[in-house]
Amino acid sequence: MKFRDMIAMSLSNLFHRRVRTVLTVMGVVIGTCAIIVMLSLGFGMRQSMEDMMKSMGDLTVVTVYGGGGSRGSGNLDDKALKNMQKLPNVTAITPVYYLDPSCVTVSCRKYQFSAMVYGVAMDTLKTFGFQAESGNLPGSDFKKTDILFGSESGYDFMDPKRQNDGMMDRTPDKNGNMPKPFVDLEKDKFTLSVNLPEDSTARKKDVKLNVLGVLAQDYSKNPNPSDCIFMDIDYAKELKAKYNKLNNVKSSESQDSYSQIVIKMDSIEAVPDAVQQITDLGYQSYSMESQRDAMEKQLRTIQMILGGLGAISLLVAALGITNTMVMSIYERTREIGIMKVLGCIVWNIRAMFLVEAGTIGFLGGAAGIGISYGISALLNSLAAKAATSGQEGGIFGMGGNISIIPLWLVFASLVFSTMVGLISGILPANRAMKISALTAIKQE
């Protein structure tokens, strides 16, 4: 029997018993839909989780803290910095040096700055993804007196002679407009001086600062470019040394250490190894990847549960295919006997039943994929309406599409449903092969 004839006969037999075939195919449709929709919900949750993590911070950044190291000194000093610079796959690294406001005074006319002053590696800010709201970020040719203001730094200038704290009130007016700060970060001129002892009669030496620009607000960045000043780390350490000398302060190892070291890796995959090596050096670290890994494990468990529920439906469909094929054999016993008497090869008989079972699986899988796309679109539409009606974050509390069907899942589902049909037809096909030709011909 030619393969083309075998296909034609198989399809003819299926459509000859339309009601039974349709009901069996519907079982496969339900099973395929259950698997695809369940897995699509898992993929939607994964995508929403990744979008949420990206909005919270750079997944390739590792922040190192000092203290508590069993194999290290616990202080983030230059030795620790050199060790971390040797780590593989490092794209950029900057220590963060906190310059106490009591050490220096940044002034603009009669107003004094009263927030954080950070010393950082200025030429790494672009690599770490900082953005300039106005002005420009420094390159490799920056001067030591170059500074960057945080987005809210204008409100951190105070008038020390005013009553209360002398700060600008940040409460918006009835129209929602914020009051203008005392200083203009882009146009005004700023100076810096090292603070002297209270009983000193010496005159402060003011250094003119060059404002490169104002950093855009980004709560995911570390340090947070909001209420602060960024300056060159070597200049910040130089200012601290001058303050200690003028005020007869004995510097200690802990005071001269960095508050943190921020490392940017070249890929997300390199982060776990870097975290482990930093731990081995005796330092504590934090990265968004650690949270992502924990959430990934939870999502994998959820996806396994959802996929298992869908697989149960497809298993029931497989039993339905087996039942249909067995009943077909009982009804076509005489036909099988005649085919054997006419010299039909036994393998062809087996193949014919396998083709019928595989066709049921294929048709059910194809229809199930189409219906799954419709269900997915409906779920995403409902989630979008829920988000716009005030239920912020969507059904899963993460926003975005809650159902995502990747292309590979479509092909995998079609192949899987077809394979389920073929496997379900093996037992009935083998049964058909073993039927005696003489017994089959006598069968009414």
Image (tube, rainbow, N blue to C red):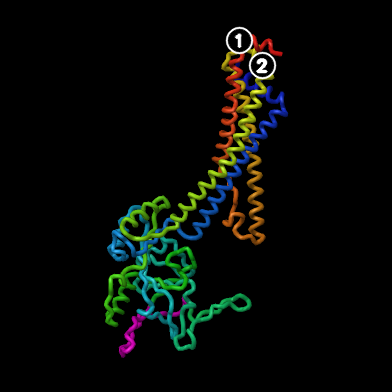
Q: CA distance from mark 1 to mark 2?
A: 16 Å
Residue 207 part of the magenta-drawn span: yes
Tell whether 158 sits left or right of 204. right
**Helix, strand or loop under label 1:** loop
Q: Which residue is mark 1?
A: 343
User: Is residue 91 visible to the viewer in this orientation of the structure?
Assistant: yes
Residue 212, x across and y down, in percent: 42, 71
Query: Residue at horizontal 58%, vertical 13%?
Result: 345
User: From the viewer's perspective, is residue 259 above or below residue 299?
Assistant: below
Q: Are marks 1 and 2 in contact (CB under 8 Å)?
A: no
The quarter of the picture where the N terminus appears is top right
Query: What label does residue 333 carry, if any?
Result: 2
Crowd rating for badge 2 (residues with CA inside 10 Å; few <14, some 14–19, many 20+)? many
The rendered magenta stretch, by its main secondary structure, is classed as loop
Identify residue type, mark 2. Answer: Thr
Residue 200 part of the magenta-drawn span: yes
Identify residue type, mark 1. Answer: Gly
Decide which of 10, 176 is in the foreground and name it. Answer: 10
Residue 396, x across and y down, in percent: 59, 54
Query: Residue at horizontal 60%, vertical 28%?
Result: 358
The quarter of the picture where the C terminus appears is top right
User: From the viewer's perspective, is residue 33 above or below residue 320?
Assistant: below
Crowd rating for badge 1 (residues with CA inside 10 Å; few <14, some 14–19, many 20+)? few
**Helix, strand or loop under label 2:** helix
Q: Which residues are magenta?
A: 185-208
Tell whether 107 sits left or right of 85. right
